[in-house]
Structure formats: structure tokens, C-alpha cells
Amino acid sequence: MNKAELVAKLADDAGVTKTQANAALDSFVEAVTKTLKGGGKVTLVGFGTFSVSKRAARTGRNPQTGETIKIKAKKVARFKAGKELSEKI
């Protein structure tokens, strides 16, 4: 399912226009992004938790040349499915 399909589904289920559903989805994504950027986490009971995880620096290999390269440390977004979501899948 892509964003357009999700917006259409949200609009049908909520009885709103696609424009309103798109605005609501964009607002949700922006709120989650700002919270994660600030170091927080977003928990939706029954659905799951969005959080930030730190990935340590490490060494890797260039698959074309076999040369060893350094991969920098970085922060990555994580999602852990909640119990209810896990049971439904």
C-alpha cells in the first residue's frame, strides 16, 4: 500500500475528503518526525512504538573491490510492533 492508497482508505473510513485525510496523515508524519528528532518516542497503544536507535561506527567492505571501508555512526528510526498488531498479523 502506498501513500495515495492509504489516504483513500482513511478518507473512506473516516468519511472525510481525500484532501483532509492527506493533511491528517502529513500532520501525523510531521509530529512523529519532530518527536524523534528531539530524542523522544511515540507510543500508540495496541499499534506500536516509534523510537530512535543509535548505530555504532563499523567497518565494511566494498563488494566490487573488496576494499575495507569505514561506515560512520548514525541515528536510525525504529518501529516495534505492539502486542495487538503482532497478534493480528
Image: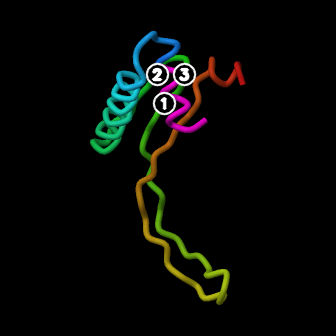
- Label 3 vs label 2: CA separation? 20 Å
The residue identified by callout 1 is 49
Quadrant that contains the C terminus: top right
Q: Secondary structure at mark 2?
A: strand
Residue 21 picture location, percent across and down? 40, 23
Q: Earlier in the sequence, mark 3 or mark 2?
A: 3
The residue identified by callout 2 is 44
Q: Is residue 85 above or below residue 33?
A: above
Is the magenta region chiefly helix, strand or loop?
A: helix
Q: Secondary structure at mark 3?
A: helix
Q: Quadrant of residue 51?
A: top left
Is 63 on the left-hand or right-hand side of 72?
right
Q: Is residue 18 above or below residue 31?
A: above
Asked whether the residues under the numbered discs 2 and 1 touch, taking CB atoms below 8 Å apart as contact, a structural biologist would say yes
Residue 86 picture location, percent across and down? 67, 25
- Identify the residue shown where x is 58% and y is 24%: 82
